Structures are given as C-alpha cells and as structure tokens.
Amino acid sequence: MDAFRLLMRLLFPFNPTTLNCFIGSLRSCSSSDCCTKAMPPRKKRRPAAGDDLSAKKSRHDSVYRKHEASRIKSEEIFSSKRCLEWFYEYAGNDDVVGPEGMEKFCEDIGVEPENVVMLVLAWKLDAQNMGYFTLQEWLKGMGALQCDTTEKLRNSLDYLRSVLNESTNFKLIYRYAFDFARVSSSSASNFQICLPKQAS
C-alpha cells in the first residue's frame, strides 16, 4: 500500500488528509457495486381505466348470472299461487273452467278439444265432468304434473301422449272414457224423458 500511496501522490498532488480519505474509501469498497446507488423500489402499475371497467363488468356479469340462475330455478319450482292465477285466466269469476274457458285453454296449449291428449289430461286431473275442470281438480292435477303455466303444460304434452303407451294406463283411461260416455248417454236419456211431449 506504501508504493500505491507513493504512486497516487505522484499522480495526484493531494494533501495528506485528502489522500488518506481517498485510500480509506478504496479499502472499504471491496466489491464493484459497493459504491453504486441502490435502485429505487419498483412502483406497482396502476390499472388503466380499461382494466378497471373490465373488472367491474366481470363482477357485474357474475352477479347477473347468479341472479338469472336463481330466477330460472324459482320459475322451475311449482307454485300454487301461480297455478291458481293460471286457473282463473280460464275460469273468470267462477270456480270451474267451463266450455268457453276450455276452448281458450285448448287454443293456448295448441291442441284441439277432441285430441286424445285432452282425455289423458282430464284423467290426470280426475275431472268428474267432461269439458269442465273444477278448481280442486285443477290444483291437484296440475300439482301432480308440476305445471303452473301454459308453457310448462305445452312441454308436458309429449309425456301425456306417452302415458297411453303403458298398457295399465291405457286400460284405466279407456275405462275412464267409457264411464264418461255412459254418464253422458244417461244424462241425455234423462233429459229426453223430462222433455214435455208434443200435443198430437
């Protein structure tokens, strides 16, 4: 170090105090990066306006999907209240769907009144009078079918048609239709008997 001190003194005419400080600083710097300045900490990139809007939209979509799934699930569950409101669309102020209401009902579900599916539906509702559905028959039968809207019943028409493919059901529905025909025939005969005879 004495030779180095001499060389430095020849190259740089420092005063002794300045030279000693310079040499001391060289001793303390044992590595090449010791005198380099520390890098400032990296700043986190602030999200751009577009990123923020995209995040908000994603959250909104997630909430909407949950709400929509909940709404659809709620609509799929049978509702007695909804079924009751549906009944009075055809019954009006009465507690029975009569011929006029039945005609509109058939039109809404897209079948003719004489279509066999209406016979199966009447059997499912356990209707006691052909062409009429009482409130109790409606609520009990539609509840069993899990139908409380026109759309749900439309979606069940294929199922109602398929009921006839099972032999036991076919026999039960045949018997049901036969009893209806017999009652209707008996009612017509009684009506004719009650008619006053025309004077000859």
Image: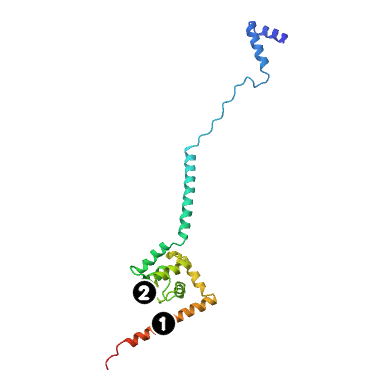
Left or right of 181 on screen, residue 198 = left
Q: Which residue is mark 2?
A: 99
SS at mark 1?
A: helix
Q: Nearer the viewer, residue 157 or 84?
A: 84
Residue appearing at x 47%, y 54% in the figure: 70
Counting every numbered tag in the picture gives 2
Quadrant assignment for the N terminus: top right
Point out residue 58 in the picture as x, y percentages from the top left corner. Answer: 49, 45
Q: Which residue is mark 1?
A: 183
SS at mark 2?
A: helix
Which amino acid type corresponds to the residue marked 1 in the rendered image? Val
Q: Is residue 13 visible?
A: no
Residue appearing at x 47%, y 43% in the figure: 56
Left or right of 19 on screen, residue 49 = left
Left or right of 93 on screen, residue 170 = right
Q: Is residue 5 above or below residue 172?
A: above
